[in-house]
Every structure is written in C-alpha cells, then in structure tokens.
Amino acid sequence: NGVSILNLSGRPVILQHWELLRGTACWFDRRLTPLTDNVAMHDEPVAHRIDAYDTHTITLADEYYFDWSPKALQGQSIYLRLYIAGRRPILKKVYSDSN
C-alpha cells in the first residue's frame, strides 16, 4: 500500500512532513483524527525533495500499516495532509468507501 505524490510544478518542492487522517472533511464541519496511534510516524522529519514533474511514493507498510477496511473506517474517508516547505498544508482525500 502506498500513496504517490506527483509534483506538477516546474520547480522542485520539499515535503517536510505528512499525516494520515480519517474522518469527514466537509467545508462546514471538519472532523479529522489521526488514523493511527503510531507515534513514529510523526517523530521523524521527512524532508524529501521532489523534483519538478517527478513522483515520490509514501509506502504505508510496517510501522505505518493500518486497517482500511470499510468495517474499520466506519463510513469515514482517509485523508493525507502534506506539509510542503513555504506553502500552506495541503489536505487530499486518498480513499473513500463511496468512491
């Protein structure tokens, strides 16, 4: 399991940190919680350089593994929050049971 991040800009970017969240993210009612209690995911700085028009894959295995079955998510979606240097955090839906 993994998530690919594609840099479509003409400039390289630096991915400083990322978070996996679950919940509902409506514009009027944001209720997002960390997907796992794994502290190791947030302890180490990432600092990956993603060159212009290049791809970086975040592998979700071993210590980053989580149960993403519909029963475990209870109707919620999975979101990825990316912290890119010099920009506001980006929140993207990466999985929804209702896709």
Image (spheres, rainbow, N blue to C red):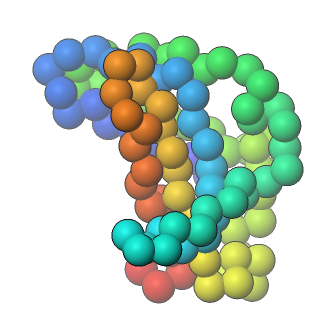
- In which quadrant of the rendered image does the C terminus lie? bottom left
Q: Quadrant of residue 21?
A: bottom right
| Any part of residue 81 in sight | yes
56 sits to left or right of 78: left
Instruction: Please name whichever residue, 47 or 3, is drawn nearer the observer in this view of the structure.
Output: 47
Report whether 59 appears left or right of 29.
right
The image position of residue 25, as x and y in percent, is 48, 69
- Which residue: 47% across, 59% down? 94
Horizontal and vertical percent for residue 46?
60, 20
The answer to whether residue 50 is seen in the rendering is no
- Indicate left or right for 54 with 40 as reference: left
Which residue is at a point 32% across and 36% down the rendered structure image?
Answer: 6
For residue 11, which quarter of the picture?
A: top left
Q: Is residue 46 above or below residue 27?
A: above
Q: Residue furthest front?
A: 28
Q: Describe residue 64's horizontal placement relative to residue 46 as left or right.
A: right
Identify the residue at image location x=77%, y=77%: 72
x, y percentage for residue 23? 61, 70
Circle count: 0
Residue at (50% x, 17% y) in the render: 48
Q: Position of residue 86 (x, y in %)?
A: 35, 19
